[in-house]
Amino acid sequence: MARDSVPRMYFASDNTSGLPGPILDAITRANEGYASGYGTDPLMDTLRARIRDLFEAPQAEVMLVTTGTAANALALATLCPPWGAIYCQDLAHIEVDECGAPEFYTGGAKLVHVTGPDGKIDAQALRDTLTRSGHGVVHAVQPAALSLTNLTECGTRYSVAEITELAQIAHDHGLPVHLDGARFVNALVAEGCTPAEMSWRAGVDVLVLGGTKNGLMGVEAVIFFDPARYWEAQLRRKRAGHLWSKHRFLSAQMLAWIEAGLWRDLAHHANEMAARLEAGLAGRLMFPRGGNMLFATLPRDTHARLQAAGAQYFLWPDHQNDPETVSARLVTSWSTRAEDVDQFLSLLE
């Protein structure tokens, strides 16, 4: 596609961008010859070792799937029985965007909401909710897991300290912690910490490391820091129809992504473009920026002008019936161009 024909001012989502050259090259290399299937390929062996090194977790097990929905739902099914409760924020991705997949894959577990501002669970609210959980009462679903989302659905970020506090509360009640990290790398880069610090050292038991929103064709890694849970997860993946035969193409993508720090570079660029947008949206933002996703309130005439000029973004339910304003979600990606950000901001003036 010629550069002039590429859509400009495209802020609809970071999972709609193309693939960086190194990822395409890795897929092409993986296409040569033959390789054993179902995750027994040599590339997967190398990837597992790389992830263990990156996360400073030599015993961790890694399972690849192609969608975030499958990754989250299978991870939670491994943690939670059908009569269990999964505690999550009101706007958690597993609640608002998974079409009941967690409930389906767990065989009927219940998502229990825990309140908090800006898409994040409030620590005291979690304590209060778990105190009233009905643990040991046969008439109630039993507490089973805590699920966090980073970045959140509001584009905000849990700090390492916040994850640690919430995970400790969960562990005090005997609950494992799942982290939906569809934009984990964006949060990691913004937080300026190591992968270990934002995961198992903070108390996360199972991490979904998302690659699709950060440059991959479609790969998510489910990382089990407790290897004892891995065998059940493998069985659930196969039973659910998510064990890829030509698995080497998944392994190749994620291996190229983490090699030489490409995953960080791509996330850094996306965050940098979001910061550029943020600077021009002062006074319009609905939530603090945590990484590469912003929510802004726009006058309807401004929205009409942006749309007419080709700007693409999603409208959020807030203000949908407001005659004066709209709520817009803007997401930058590894391929967002500075000139597109600048053009968008110039139309706001």
Image (cartoon, rainbow, N blue to C red):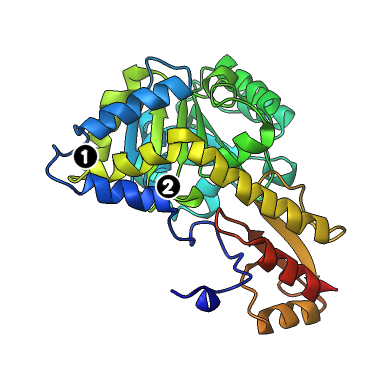
Say left or right for 149 vs 281. left
Crowding around mark 1 (Cα neighbors within 10 Å: few <14, some 14 to 19, many 20+) is few
Q: Which residue is mark 1?
A: 238
Q: Which quarter of the figure is the C terminus placed in?
A: bottom right
- Snapshot quadrant of residue 343: bottom right
Q: Earlier in the sequence, mark 1 or mark 2?
A: 2
Q: Residues within 10 Å of mark 2 (few under 14, many from 20)?
A: many
| Residue in the foreground of this view, choosing between 35 and 212 | 35
Query: What residue is shown at x 49% (from left), y 61% (from top)?
Result: 17
Point 19% across, 32% down: residue: 40
Secondary element at image label 1: helix
Residue 133 can be seen in this image = yes
Residue 266 x/y as whole percent: 55, 46
Q: Is residue 218 visible?
A: no
Image quadrant containing the N terminus: bottom left
Residue denoted by label 2? 68
Q: Nearer the viewer, residue 269 or 318?
A: 269
